[in-house]
Amino acid sequence: MSPHDPAHDASHGHAHGHAHGPAHAHAPACCHGGPGAPAAAAPAPAGGLLLRIPAMDCPVEEGQIRRALEGFAGLRRLHFDLPARLLAVDAPPASWDAVTAAIRQLGFQTETLSAPPAAADTARARRAELARLVAALAVAAGAELLHFFAPDGGAWQLAGMALAAAAIALSGLAVFRKGLSSLARGQLNINALMSVAVTGAFAIGQWPEAAMVMALYSLAELIEARAVERARHAIAGLLALSPEQAEVRQPDGGWARMAAKAVAVGATVRVKPGERFALDGSVTAGRGAVDQSPVTGESMPVDKAPGDPVFAGTINQGGALEFEVTRPAGDTVLAGIIHAVEAAQGQRAPTQRFVDRFAAVYTPAVFVLALAVAVGMPLLLGWPWLTGLYKALVLLVIACPCALVISTPVTVVSGLAAAARRGILIKGGTHLENARRLRVLALDKTGTLTEGRPRLVARQVLAGDEAGVLRIARSLAARSDHPVSQAVAAGLDGEPPLPVDDFGAEAGRGVYGRVDGRDAVLGNHRWIHERGQCSPELEALMQQHEAQGRTVSLLADGSRVLALFAVADTTKATSREAVAALKAMGVRPVMLTGDNPSTARAIGDQVGIADVQANLLPQDKQRAIAALAAHGAVGMVGDGVNDSPGLAAAAVGFSMGAAGTDTAKETADVLIMDDDLRKVPETIRLSQRTHAVLWQNIVLALSIKAVFFALAVFGSATMWMAVFADMGASLLVVANGLRLLRGARA
């Protein structure tokens, strides 16, 4: 598999956990968000910094902090746990003070923790917050009832105002704190807008509406946060697939269950039928089928025998298997997938950067528009001053950019999680968006279009008894370690081998020996020609096979050629279907290979690729991709070290068969965990769907706001309507983004 290429990271914007777009000083921050779906607390990295940030409860506020911290020297990874208000920072201790100071400059108070709070404490705090918001809604409803039904009088009005103030205090103190902090820094974000709108409504006598708006706003944010966390933790839920305990062989030969994280590399673990593997390893005893879909996305179980790899989280569907542990619990392939997706989630996609820039201008612009309505309309159109002020306050509520800003990250994260569940690991939203732009796809031959292993595809006995001749060939081939000879032996495994005397090998030619009293050689075309045993008929027969990209081996005795064996690297069963799917999508497939032209053309004909470039060195592939870029964005699919330059040069690089590799160090932008080439067009289709959903959300959010802008200025929109429109839009775009998770099988 391809090793990590630092140059590729520089050209493609790779960063494992802390690469983001340019910072914006006035990027909007979301308001008070409630607890999300239950999730594990942010783990404190070894030697890292763990902070509790009480006012950080929204994905947009997470984005603010990410942008503030990008570029810090030595920063390796950020892990946010919004429900618990925790941030784990993987960075050198020398930078901790600077990190904390940067967060506090945004108006967030921080507390340094030595360990995450207990899960029970976090759950209790979430329940208390939900109860507080429900109580605030009930108190606000009481204020509304008093306003409508209580008789006019100072005492009743004071009671109603007291209830409204209590509801605002219960639900909105955090909003006011963050809003005042933002205003003090000269930033106009949603907290500032809501603080001004609610205060203004209360001041002009609309105190029941002010209370209900703040309570509904906070409760809707709680619901929104739950939906966002569902996307954020969709892939992390795969960790639950790995059992916490494993059955380990003891020194006395017995078996005992112990914690998976305590099992050492090299230990032998037993997995019974129906159980999940707790660790990665290599089978040492037993045979059976394993469901690998949680890791590779393969739809069919894979047969396992001694020597085959197994992965944590997969399911043993056959007989009992014993395996030797090859990776510790924290370094399994499944854990690597989850960590890579979490790192990808921290990168901002191009559409997300565009939306952030737009929102940074949009919010101040609406604030100015609200001022113009409050002052200009009474002067120009003769509106009552209270009417102008009220309509301006409605505009401030509508100006909330949450629906717009949240729509992009939740959509991208859902797309990344959906891909990971299908065995496609995409290293960031940028690559997820760029895949749809591909117009040319360069494909390596060996291991990508083909199996990467020579197989016996044809045999022909030319003289002598067929069974005896094949037995001699099997006996000689079984003694050789050459891949072609091994392919012949494997293809003739039904023929029992005979003892071989005087066995030897001629470098670059073949092997020889005495079998059943007969001297025989199993060699290539060149050796048989040197022995003077080629005939025009035999030459013509060999040319037929060589024209199809096959390697020919010949069995001969002292006087004649006895049999011909053709070995080839066969195409994968899915290659032709994948190439056809690419063509149907308007993507032009091109084969780039270091193999000879005849073999390359033969494979190209089999899979449906007309454009074949052969005899290429790794640097030649890189130059070929640069030349193909004249026809549009170029992707590259490969599986070997020699493909690394091409993968780095491509707009999107795909690596095949990445399960079991160090995914964080792969050069490619997209890792296909199994060898199914059909997942490349599947990735492009997912990219197209993600792009469509992104723009659906942007258009939906802006359209709803445009309608309510018109209603607020020229109609009869109320603050109630404004808050329902804003939070309704937020929930709609989040739900639309979560649609990408449908059909993604875990």
Image (cartoon, rainbow, N blue to C red):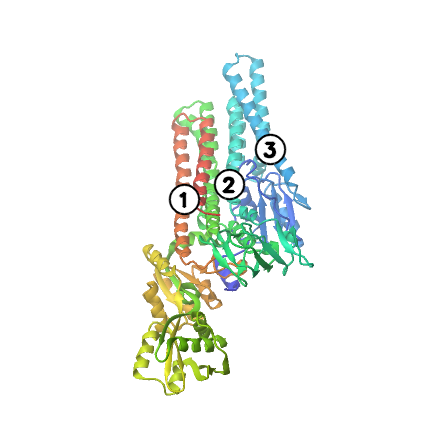
At x 37% / y 76%, what residue is drawn?
A: 466
- Residue type at the position of mark 3: Arg
The image quadrant of residue 580 is: bottom left
Tally of numbered tags: 3
Q: Which residue is mark 2?
A: 228
Label 3 neighbour load within 10 Å: few <14, some 14-19, many 20+: few
Q: Are marks 2 and 3 in contact (CB under 8 Å)?
A: no
Q: Are marks 1 and 2 in contact (CB under 8 Å)?
A: no
- Residue type at the position of mark 2: Val
CA gap, disc 1 and disc 2: 15 Å
Which of 256/281 is in front? 256
55 vs 335: above or below = above
Q: Which residue is mark 3?
A: 127
Residue 252 shows in the view? yes
At x 56% / y 55%, what residue is drawn?
A: 320
Tell me which numbered mark, 1 or 3, is placed earlier along the sequence. 3
CA gap, disc 2 and disc 3: 18 Å
At x 44% / y 22%, what residue is drawn?
A: 384
714 vs 37: above or below = above
Q: Secondary structure at mark 2?
A: helix
CA gap, disc 1 and disc 3: 33 Å
Residue 188 shows in the view? no
Tell me which numbered mark, 1 or 2, is placed earlier along the sequence. 2
Residue 680 spot, x, y in % from top left: 41, 56
- Residue type at the position of mark 1: Val
Label 1 neighbour load within 10 Å: few <14, some 14-19, many 20+: many
Q: Which residue is mark 1?
A: 693
In the rendered structure, the answer to whether residue 310 lies left or right of residue 358 reads: right
Label 2 neighbour load within 10 Å: few <14, some 14-19, many 20+: many
Residue 308 spot, x, y in % from top left: 53, 61
